[in-house]
């Protein structure tokens, strides 16, 4: 739920309640459906009787996994442009926190929401290093983790933030180009089977 961004404000106990309620409801539907298919094969009756409750119990997990994947993909797509904006802001003379605040107000999306939460933590007294660690735990995104670890090392060793941001932004653009090339190379292979089937 944390990785999914707490969709609809649901917490863990409420999520468990939803799973149990769906299990009971789908189990009842399975019993009703089995009684209405008495003339069919026993295999179909067992499939209906046990398949519907399992669908009700594991359906929310699949929905949550989809939310996590969509959120991670949105953050991954927004990260290179966000780093570019950070580089421009820092090189223009803003501090790192001010540049982050500018990103939060300019670029909407889950990545900006997480940066805003990190800023809120630092404002209430949490050390920036700990706030960055919390952000890593909440997102579990490799590219964002490498960026935050580089920023933590820069802060620890006194390296110029603008230089680190510039290097990270260049690296993110290269990775984005590589991901696009991988998808382009995989497209012909995916097209072959539908094409042969349609022919």
Image: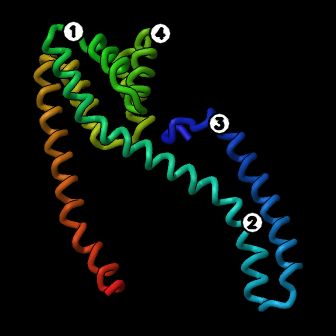
**Residue 84 drawn at (x, y percent):** 19, 27
- Residue with the mark numbered 1: 94
Mark 4 or mark 1, which has the lower sequence index? 1
- Residue with the mark numbered 4: 124
- Residue with the mark numbered 2: 53
Q: Is residue 190 left or right of residue 67?
A: left
Q: Is residue 123 left or right of residue 16?
A: left
**Residue 71 drawn at (x, y percent):** 44, 42
| Disc nearest the viewer among 4 and 1 | 1
Where, quadrant-wise, is the N terminus in this rendering? Answer: top right
Q: Residue at x 71, y 52 (%)?
A: 19
**Residue 21 drawn at (x, y percent):** 79, 52
- Residue with the mark numbered 3: 11
Question: Disc 2, disc 1: CB below 8 Å?
Answer: no
Q: What's the CA distance linking mark 4 and mark 2?
A: 46 Å
Mark 3 or mark 2, which has the lower sequence index? 3
Q: What's the CA distance linking mark 3 and mark 4?
A: 23 Å
Where, quadrant-wise, is the C terminus in this rendering? Answer: bottom left
Q: Residue at x 29, y 10 (%)?
A: 98
Task: Label 1, secondary structure: give it.
Answer: loop
Mark 2 or mark 1, which has the lower sequence index? 2
């Amino acid at each position: 739920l944390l990785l999914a961004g707490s969709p609809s404000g649901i917490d863990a106990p409420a999520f468990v309640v939803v799973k149990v309620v769906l299990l009971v409801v789908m189990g009842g539907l399975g019993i009703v459906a089995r009684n209405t298919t008495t003339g069919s094969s026993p295999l179909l009756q067992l499939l209906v009787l046990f398949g519907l409750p399992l669908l009700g119990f594991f359906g929310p997990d699949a929905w949550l996994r989809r939310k996590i994947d969509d959120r991670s993909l949105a953050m991954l797509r927004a990260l290179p442009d966000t780093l570019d904006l950070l580089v421009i802001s820092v090189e223009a003379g803003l501090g790192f926190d001010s540049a982050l605040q500018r990103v939060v107000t300019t670029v909407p999306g889950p990545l900006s929401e997480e940066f805003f939460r990190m800023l809120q933590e630092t404002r209430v007294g949490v050390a920036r290093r700990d706030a960055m660690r919390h952000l890593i735990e909440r997102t579990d995104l490799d590219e964002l983790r490498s960026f935050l670890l580089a920023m933590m090392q820069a802060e620890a060793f006194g390296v110029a933030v603008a230089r680190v941001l510039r290097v990270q932004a260049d690296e993110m653009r290269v990775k984005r180009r590589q991901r696009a090339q991988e998808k382009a190379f995989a497209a012909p292979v995916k097209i072959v089977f539908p094409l042969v089937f349609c022919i």
